[in-house]
Amino acid sequence: MKKNLTALLVLLSLVVNAQQKLTLEDCYALANKNYPIAKQAELLQQKNTYDIEALKKGKLPKIDLNAQATYQSEVTELPIKIPNVVVTPLNKDQYRATLDVNQLIYNGGVIDANTKLKEAQTKTQQQQVAVSLYQLKTRINQYYFSILLLQEKEALLISKQEQLSSRINEVQSGVKYGAILPASEKVLEAEILKIKQQLIEIKSDKTKLLQNMATLTYSPIENTTKLVKPNFTIDFKKESNRPELKLFDLQSQQIETSSALLSKNQLPKVNAFGQAGYGNPGLNMLNNSFETFYMVGLKANWNVFDWNKTKAEKQALSVSKEIINSEKETFTINNQMQLQEFENEIQKNQDILATDTEIIDLRNTILKSSDSQLKNGVITSSDYIVEFTNLYEAKTNQKLHEIQLELAKANYQVIKGN
């Protein structure tokens, strides 16, 4: 029982710790899932389904029920008198009710072409949503690595505080035996208070940034959440895979589909029709009485000359496609320039980090000497604080350069579309 309880406590501890960690990929995924515009992709697909369903209804028979009652000033009469024949003139009030059925037989594939156009439009709109969501990654990167930097600074300040507290104990012993001046202890205590102020500022700034991240990802993020430092492997030779490039391609495909629809509209259209009715008069205009009637037939329509309207519309589409191609080319050039800038930024930070380690090693050596001198009363606490601060400033710079390097890598990945 005791073993089971211990295992349960360990498991709960692991769960709690897991809940307090957040990766950069987690933030991307939360934004893609929860950001309001993300819902549009599914809504656009639903709209496309309804639109296509409505288009396909055009292949079904069209049924209309019509009724009319009229009164006219004159009616048709025979212009001559025929002996022994009496022709009753039509009533000036006339009535008719009909059921009309029209069935599309052939329209050149316009409905299918419209269906393809709707699908192309939906894919383009969904890709536009993907582009908008992808652009959030740059903002997420800024927040994420700013928080990471504050975490690193906080850890360094806590370590600095602990070491100073340890030095205070040593100084108190030196003061007691007269080896160190009493003021030295106060100098160290003042430095600890300064660190506490810095920790308060960091906590406040980190809380604000975490709240911004929570707003951007539409997810609750606790102030105790620890962000995991990413470790990117950059492939500089890999081709760009930005969603904007796919959007340009889909826009071009949509234009080609629109052009195909214009060609379909020029083809002849054939419909079958039928009409059944009841009225006075019926089809026999000489029968002045109510009667039933029907009519069936075929109807063809072909607009053989449209004053080059279709040609002009196709030319406009062709120009639109050229515009899209120019936009794609412009985007590609700017994208390559951005990639080159961040490639240089990555190289710069790597070179700087190579010297950070050397600086820290030198500062550590100097501080060890100052530590010994402080214990022996050779230097004052103020002198020691100067070297102690120099060491932690070097460590802070190293962490800053590490974060800047990873941020540059993250932005490079985003710009490249990986």
Image (cartoon, rainbow, N blue to C red):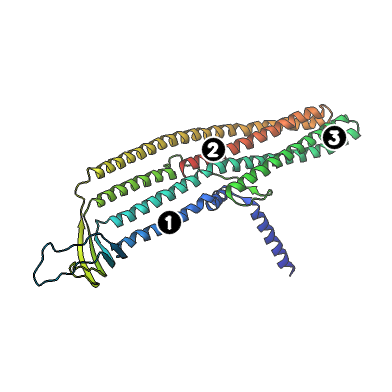
- In space, the residues marked 3 and 2 are separated at their CA atoms by 44 Å
Mark 1: few, some, or many residues within 10 Å (few <14, many ≥20)?
A: few
Q: Is residue 217 above or below residue 394?
A: below
Q: Nearer the viewer, mark 1 or mark 3?
A: 1
Q: Left of 357 or right of it: where is 241?
A: left
**Would you identify the image quadrant in which residue 159 lies?**
top right
Quadrant location of the N terminus in the rendered image = bottom right
- Is residue 101 left or right of 342 when viewed as pictured? left
Q: Amino acid at mark 3?
A: Val
Q: Which percent across, then down, holds residue 187?
A: 82, 31
Q: Is residue 71 visible?
A: yes
Q: Residues within 10 Å of mark 3 (few under 14, many from 20)?
A: many
Helix or strand or loop: what does disc 2 sit on? helix
Picture quarter containing residue 383?
Answer: top right
Tell me the distance, in whole angstroms, between the alpha carbons under discs 1 and 3: 75 Å
Return the residue nearer the eye: 283 or 208. Answer: 283
Of 75 and 361, nearer the camera is 75
User: Residue drawn 80% across and 39% down?
Assistant: 165
- Residue 408's tag is 2
> Residue 104 in the image: x percent, y percent?
26, 62
Of tags 1 and 2, the one toward the viewer is: 1
Give the labeled residue for mark 3.
Answer: 171
Q: Nearer the viewer, residue 183 or 82?
A: 82
Identify residue type, mark 1. Lys
Which of pointers 3 and 2 lies earlier in the amino acid sequence?
3
Q: Residues within 10 Å of mark 2 (few under 14, many from 20)?
A: many
Pointer 1 residue: 47
